[in-house]
Image (cartoon, rainbow, N blue to C red):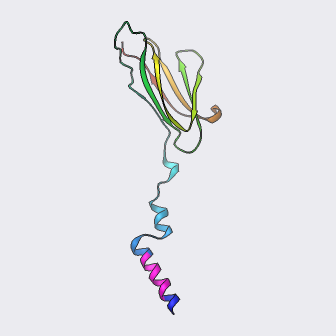
Amino acid sequence: MLSLTLSCSFSICCFWLGACSEGRHHSSPDRTDVKPLLTAEPNPAPAGDPDQPLATTVITWNTGNEATGDLYVKVNRSPEFRLARARSGTLKIDWIQFDSTYQFRLYTKKHSKLLAKVDVTRDN
């Protein structure tokens, strides 16, 4: 009888306080809803001094899950090349030139799936 009373009391407390595992399960975020992130700030890179040939932007990325990602850049029509390999990160890019388009691309590791891309230019 005592064990039945304790069991019922625990169930009532669990329900009332939302402390049972089922309540915790529903309140935790679903990791599959997180989207990959790839941003450039500022974008476009400010023109600044016309005599200064290079500008700076900061690239921030996150694959949206625990998978490792590869960050690539493609400048105009040249082949893309890898800049970094990590699940997430921030990278200062201080080589943005006038009259060029820099397409930053975030792939799953080993270049198998494009997760996100962002084009960066420089104000004229």
User: Which contiguous range is marked in magenta?
Assistant: 5-13
Task: From the viewer's perspective, tell me whether residue 42 is left or right of residue 71.
Answer: left
Residue lying at 59% horizontally and 21% vertically, measured from the top left = 80
Q: Position of residue 49 (x, y in %)?
A: 34, 10
The part of the image, by quadrant, that contains residue 86 is: top right
Of all residues, the one furthest to the left in this rendering is: 48
Residue lying at 49% horizontally and 63% vertically, measured from the top left = 25
Residue lying at 55% horizontally and 15% vertically, measured from the top left = 77
Looking at the image, residue 58 lies above or below residue 31 = above
Residue 24 in magenta stretch:
no
Q: Which of these two is toward me, 54 or 30?
A: 54
Residue 7 in magenta stretch:
yes
Q: Position of residue 67 (x, y in %)?
A: 59, 42
Q: How many marks?
A: 0
Looking at the image, residue 65 lies above or below residue 30 = above
Q: Which of these two is toward me, 117 or 2?
A: 2
The part of the image, by quadrant, that contains residue 51 is: top left
Of all residues, the one furthest to the top in this rendering is: 51
Task: From the viewer's perspective, tell me whether residue 104 is left or right of residue 55.
Answer: right
Q: Tell me the quadrant of the picture where the C terminus can be found.
A: top left
Q: Position of residue 30 (x, y in %)?
A: 49, 53
Q: Position of residue 68 (x, y in %)?
A: 59, 39
Q: Magenta stretch mostly in which secondary structure?
A: helix
Looking at the image, residue 66 lies above or below residue 21 = above
